[in-house]
Image (cartoon, rainbow, N blue to C red):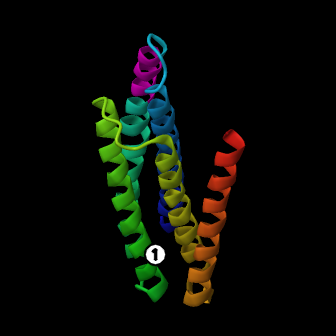
């Protein structure tokens, strides 16, 4: 039973992350459509609203909820509560906070409020990448991952991601 729960947990983590990565892309496109002239703006934003609603409520939220159900179930089957799991759960809590922040942006954009520009959204999108790397490394490496090296690796990843955003921004201009 443990392996079935683990497989389902991984599947729903993948769909949850896919939804979070893609919803921010839709936020970016929707925010950029705000600068288009009519009727292009209305046409694009109507389509993006449909896509965002279906993705958010049809895939992302259900995956987050199922992941939240399967995670503790899986942990209860593990037998113990090692230190690496406690650290992983801190990142998972951060990921749910990130998810809720995306829900706020979703509600704003659905209401025609654009507080986040496309550049800020691109940067915010990379936070999910940092959570993904941290959580997967902790789940796979477990006790063999040094805390210091893990933090240094995450810092290096963040530097690379932000440098990539900067390079992309310059190339776009």
- The structure residue drawn at horizontal position 52% and vertical position 69%, both measured from the top left corner, is 135
Tell me the residue that label 1 is attached to.
88
Of residue 4 and residue 46, the one placed in the foreground of this image is 46
- The structure residue drawn at horizontal position 49% and vertical position 14%, both measured from the top left corner, is 40
* Residue bounds of the magenta highlight: 41-51
Q: Where 36 falls versus 134 (above or below)?
A: above
Helix, strand or loop at label 1? It is: helix
What quarter of the picture does the C terminus occupy?
top right
- The structure residue drawn at horizontal position 41% and vertical position 67%, both measured from the top left corner, is 92
- The structure residue drawn at horizontal position 64% and vertical position 54%, both measured from the top left corner, is 166
Q: Where 29 falls versus 146 (above or below)?
A: above
Tell whether position 118 is magenta. no
Of residue 120 and residue 97, the one placed in the foreground of this image is 120
List x then y, in percent, for residue 48.
45, 26
Q: Where 76 falls versus 132 (above or below)?
A: below
Q: Residues within 10 Å of mark 1 (few under 14, many from 20)?
A: some
Of residue 27 and residue 4, the one placed in the foreground of this image is 27
């Amino acid at each position: 039973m443990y392996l079935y729960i683990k497989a389902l947990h991984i599947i729903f983590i993948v769909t949850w992350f896919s939804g979070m990565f893609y919803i921010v892309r839709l936020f970016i496109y929707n925010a950029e459509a705000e600068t288009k002239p009519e009727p292009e703006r209305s046409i694009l934003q109507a389509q993006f609203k449909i896509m965002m609603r279906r993705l958010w409520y049809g895939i992302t939220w259900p995956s987050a909820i199922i992941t939240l159900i399967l995670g503790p179930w899986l942990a209860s089957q593990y037998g113990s509560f090692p230190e690496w799991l406690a650290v992983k759960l801190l990142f998972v809590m951060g990921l749910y906070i990130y998810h809720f922040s995306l829900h706020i942006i979703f509600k704003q954009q659905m209401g025609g409020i654009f507080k986040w520009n496309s550049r800020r959204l691109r940067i915010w999108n990379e936070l999910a990448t940092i959570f993904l790397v941290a959580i997967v490394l902790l789940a796979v490496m477990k006790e063999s991952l040094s805390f210091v090296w893990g933090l240094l690796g995450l810092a290096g990843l963040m530097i690379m991601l932000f440098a990539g955003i900067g390079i992309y921004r310059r190339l776009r201009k």
